[in-house]
Image (cartoon, grey):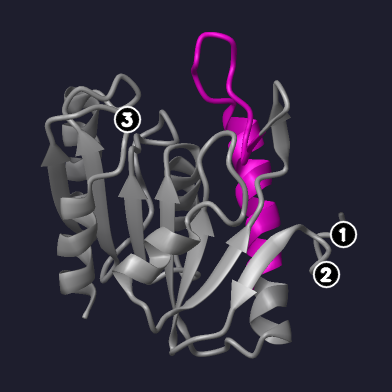
Amino acid sequence: MNARDLTRPHYFQAGSNRTFLLLHGTGADEHDLVPLAKLLDSEAGILSPRGLYLEGGMNRFFERYSDGSFNEESIDQAVSELADFLEVATEEYGLAGNEFVAVGFSNGANTAAAIMVRYPTLLSAGVLLGSTRPFAASLETDLTGKRIWIGNGDQDPYAPIAVTKKWIQELEQAGAEVNWLRHAGGHQVSQAHLQEISRQLT
């Protein structure tokens, strides 16, 4: 794949001046979150790239080690490639001036958070479902004016509550407006969360 063209597998649908950047979870593809995006805002455009890293044949956006911890060099490579992809797609699809909202689940949500940390000017908001912090180091990025929704299950083994609390504190200290939505389940998406986020997006 050439990072400067659109040969990366992806799904695109034109829409309003809001465009969702959809980032799927492990084992899914560029079509997986399209129905979810339509629930959040049926009028929004959709740009959904496929994760290019393969783990046991399953699509992901970045590598993790055998103990489940993240390879942060792989994260940086992934978000750099996505930033290039977003730049080219913006030009090719005529999306300049649009509000870009990243919507991700699990690996995709962690990738969305990493984009906001490394390339804060690309996105105005992030919907992070089943997510945790992407980088171990303390947050130093200015996220003033960014809206972030974190929707996690209290029993999610991939998103411990204590880690989420600290992560939210750092995001808020960086200037982000964070809404933490919690459900009693595990590593899954809550329909109630989607309804609440949809209401707040309008």
Q: Are marks 1 and 2 in contact (CB under 8 Å)?
A: yes
Please tell me which residue is depicted at 55% across the width and 34% down the height of the picture.
Answer: 26
Circle nearer the N terminus (3, 2)? 2
Which image quadrant is residue 162 in? top left
**Relative image position of residue 189 (x, y in whole percent):** 30, 43
Q: Are marks 1 and 3 in contact (CB under 8 Å)?
A: no
The mark tally for this picture is 3
Other residues around mark 1 within 10 Å, as few (<14) / some (14–19) / many (≥20) = few
Q: Is residue 76 magenta?
A: yes
Q: Nearer the viewer, mark 3 or mark 2?
A: 3
Amino acid tagged 3: His
Quadrant that contains the C terminus: bottom left
Q: Which mark is residue 95?
A: none
**Relative image position of residue 200 (x, y in whole percent):** 16, 71
Q: Is residue 111 magenta?
A: no
Give the magenta-colored segment's residue range: 59-86
Mark 1 lies on residue? 2
Other residues around mark 2 within 10 Å, as few (<14) / some (14–19) / many (≥20) = some
Amino acid tagged 2: Asp
Mark 2 lies on residue? 5
Mark 3 lies on residue? 187
Locate residue 177 relative to residue 187 in the image: left or right: left
Q: 46 and 133: which one is in front?
A: 46
**Relative image position of residue 135 (x, y in whole percent):** 44, 34
**Residue 28 visible somewhere in the drawing:** yes
Amino acid tagged 1: Asn
